[in-house]
Image (cartoon, helix red, strand yellow):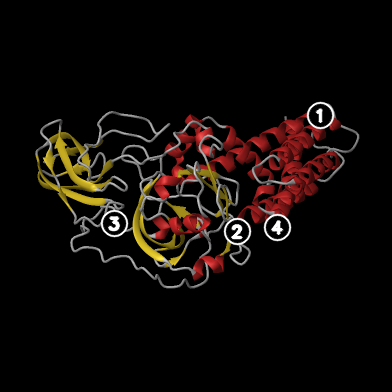
Amino acid sequence: MRRRLGYAARGVAAAMFGIGIAEFLAAFLGASSSPVGAVARFAIDSAPVAVKESAIRWFGTGDKLVLVAGVILVLFALSVVAGLLCLRSRAGGSVLIAVLGIAGALAAASGTGAGPLDALPSLLAALLGAGVLRVLTRGPGPQAVGERTGVDRRVALGAFAIGAAGLAAGRLTGAPDRPVAGVLPRAADPAPPLPPGHRFAIPGLSPFRTANADFYRVDTDLTLPAIDPGEWALRIHGAVDKPVELSYRDLLARPLVERDMTLCCVSNEVGGPYVSTTRWLGVPLAALLRESGVRAGADQLLSISTDGMTIGTPTGLVLDGREAMLVVGMNGEPLPRKHGYPVRMIVPGLYGYASATKWLTELKLTSFAADRAYWVRRGYVAQGTAKTASRIDVPRPFAQLRPGPVTVAGIAWALHRGIEAVQVRVDGGPWMRAELTADAGPDLWRQWRWSWRADPGSHRLEVRAVDGSGRMQTGDRAEVFPSGSTGWHSVLVTVSE
């Protein structure tokens, strides 16, 4: 048994050495060349929608960390197999390590926007891992317990340590969301003053404006893109009369507008956390498109990220007067890296998958018939209109309450339609009208509250909203896929003496 454990450990050490050196190299070549990242991205692109939604539901914004950890664990499990193969054939174990590296190279080279150079770190991992395993298992072959296998175990420990250090350095180099330096120009068109009474000060209630650190993040990037704004450029092309290319400086030189807007993800389940509100600073998108001259038939604005992500937005909705923007600032600061620095897109009224491209580099005028965006190819509806939703923030689910007056509070949103009313009921009883904060605009959520005289026992609280057009939020339950969840949010509480 000790001999088998020793060979298994040598397989792990060899794999760690190869992967670690390769990840360190990938930190300089770019995130798309990371062997671990390439395999994880392949898993994301290949996974069924149900798996993707389940990962978000179970792990939230930690889904990417869980995926990367899972990829590493699988690689090490296979490296154990490679080490054990060396009990019978040194060549067999080395071949398995090499095959793993070649698989990583193929995943890296086939990624969106990838090139041949992106395969280099994985190929290096294959060469180093296979070579080190042969060194660690050299000698006269399997021997008795306690005898050397042709190499001091300190060499294996050293290979593992070097690889672990390289892996840590490579993964951490591009990971932190460091604050972005620089000062943005003032808005030529500042956000209008918020009306008195636009928020309630209730402990546990979502604040009217979400802090940058708390703003939800859902995307497919395992490592945050590191983009130099001095080298960044935006292309507007396709079915336009005059293609345009703008630098970051060109964009900042244009008149900037400032607006408060709510953004929601299609992956948000009933009562879920993937909705936030902030103050955005950016350039009106409609003006840019009109300057380029949108041609007839171009019913889709296909936005493309630096990582190759594509998002399709109905062109007509960008041009219908809503505050569609190319965003450069967030809550008075330059756009954070995790939220799309240097430039992202926002179109009110749509889920993020149909409007909110991060790390934007291209805008292509095309048609829905000619081009299918990333999530549409995976079965989501093309238009992406956000549905009316409401949520109970206070009290929390399964809260233990005392009898008497209890404040029930939460938020409601119907993007680009606004909220007209919110209703609450207890245990399936009559719907009661809640008090709303002052209306700050149709592109923003509204907080609400209702005073409930709680009696002892277990109770179910439910909420529903009416949008600005007078349409009631549906109580029919629908899953996130393919067009967003529906249903009334509810919480169970216990009132005891």
Looking at numbered disc 2 in the image, what kind of residue is underneath it? Ala
N-term mark: 3 or 2:
3
Q: Distance between the Cα atoms at labels 3 and 2? A: 30 Å
Residue depicted at 81% across the width and 33% down the height: 95
Which picture quadrant has residue 211?
Answer: bottom left
Mark 2 lies on residue: 226
Give the residue type at disc 1.
Answer: Leu
Give the residue pinned by disc 3: 207
Check disc 2 and report its element: helix, strand or loop: loop
Mark 3 or mark 2: which is in front?
Answer: 2
- Is any atom of residue 79 visible in this view? yes
| Place of residue 344 in the rendered image (x, y in percent of width and height, measured from the top left) | 49, 55
Label 3 – label 1 distance at C-alpha: 61 Å
**How packed is label 1: few (under 14 Cα within 10 Å), some, or many (20 or more)?**
some
The nearer-to-camera label among 2 and 4 is 2
User: Sequence order check: which comes first, mark 3 or mark 1?
Assistant: 1
Tell me if I can see residue 142 in this picture: no
Instruction: Check disc 4 and report the residue beneath it.
Output: 28
Screen quadrant of the C terminus:
top left
Q: How many labels does the image show?
A: 4
Counting residues from the N terminus, which is met first, the one under dot 2 or under dot 1? 1
- Circle 4 Cα neighbour tier, 10 Å, few/some/many (<14 / 14–19 / ≥20): few
Q: Which residue is drawn at 77% across and 47% down?
A: 120
Task: Using the image as rendered, state which of residue 85 and residue 181 is in the foreground.
Answer: 181
Element on which disc 1 rests: loop
Residue 147 coordinates in the image, percent (x, y): 83, 37
